[in-house]
Image (tube, rainbow, N blue to C red):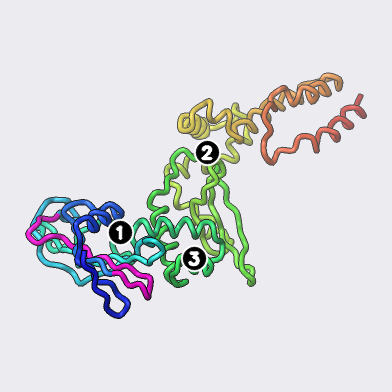
Amino acid sequence: MNLYFQSGEVLMAIHPALTAHYRKLLDLPAPWRITDIALNVAEKRVDITIEWPEGKRVSCPVCGKRCGMKDHREERVWRHLHTMNFATFLHCRTPRSECREHGAKTIAVPWGESNSRWTLLFEIFAVEVLQEVSVLSKAAHILRISWDEAQAIRKRAVKRGLKRRETAGIEHLGIDEKSFGKKVRFITVLSDLDDGRVLEVAPKKSTESAKKVMEVIPKEERETVRHTRYLFLKRPENWSDEQKKQYRDIKREYGATKFAQSRIGRAWTIKEAFRHFWTYVQPVWARKFFDRGCGGTSGRPIAGCNRSSRLPECSRTISTAS
């Protein structure tokens, strides 16, 4: 292999073993090929040029059909992971397909997403750094990029996460208000309480913000739990036909066992069991009712239901009555 030095830059006559080495590092599929590798020792930088061979058919990025290549776009540059502590950049004039149905379209490249200045591997590493470093400027310093570039990578990661967001199977939702910043600005946060996931965020704290974050939940799922407050406060024998249907729909949607084990299901069971308390004539039997744990239905604690704070008062009332 012949090496030529020019102003701190090493120009290499590409050796097949070297191109095979970088092909493996980049996981570059055929027929993409490496045509140039430039090493700048002074700037600690490696520039790799990749191209699609002339005459090779391409795939339309819209329909996926094989078609001819129309032309190439202007050269683009992607930031890649470091090579031996040298900043690495990929250069390519991306081909455009000539699809009969969709016309000229820029084909997808295997190392990065469209309209991105970084390879996928670099973005994955950058997101991991951003998750571990709370200060954006410090994360940008570690990655050797600007603050604006780090912010752009974070926004792209959030956008990808929102595309993969799923709301099916969520049992417990939480809406909370968070303050941040010196000026005490507020945001409204919708979370999956079981998995610890943030589902949506809206600015300010208001009814409108709460409605905004709830829009990520499909309408049919929101309707399932809407207006259930008075349903569970009323006695079953006083339910209207519409409320009976609503109760059946909820049990069918979540499953009878899952509903019975949920917080609202357990709370409703205790509420129904407590109705028996008012049938006691003798205070001693009423006191035993409490000793059994409100009818023996409080095996699992319910968040926000502090039974112990009311029992002493009830016991004193029963004792006074006896």
Bounds of the magenta segment: 39-58
Residue 247 x %, y %? 52, 32
- The answer to which quarter of the image holds residue 320 is top right
Please rate how many residues cluster around mark 2, counting C-alpha atoms within 10 Å: few if below 14, some from 14 to 19, many from 20. Answer: some
Report the residue marked by disc 3: 142
Give whichever of 307, 104 is nearer the camera: 104
Q: Which mark is residue 171?
A: 2
* In this view, the mark in front (1 or 3): 3
Whether residues under marks 2 and 1 lie with C-beta atoms below 8 angstroms apart, the answer is no
Report the residue marked by disc 1: 112
- Under mark 2, the amino acid is Glu
- The answer to which quarter of the image holds residue 119 is bottom left
Residue 207 x %, y %? 56, 58
At mark 2, the secondary structure is loop
| Tag count | 3
- Under mark 1, the amino acid is Gly
Position of residue 210 in the picture relative to residue 122 (left or right): right
Position of residue 91 in the picture relative to residue 154 (left or right): left
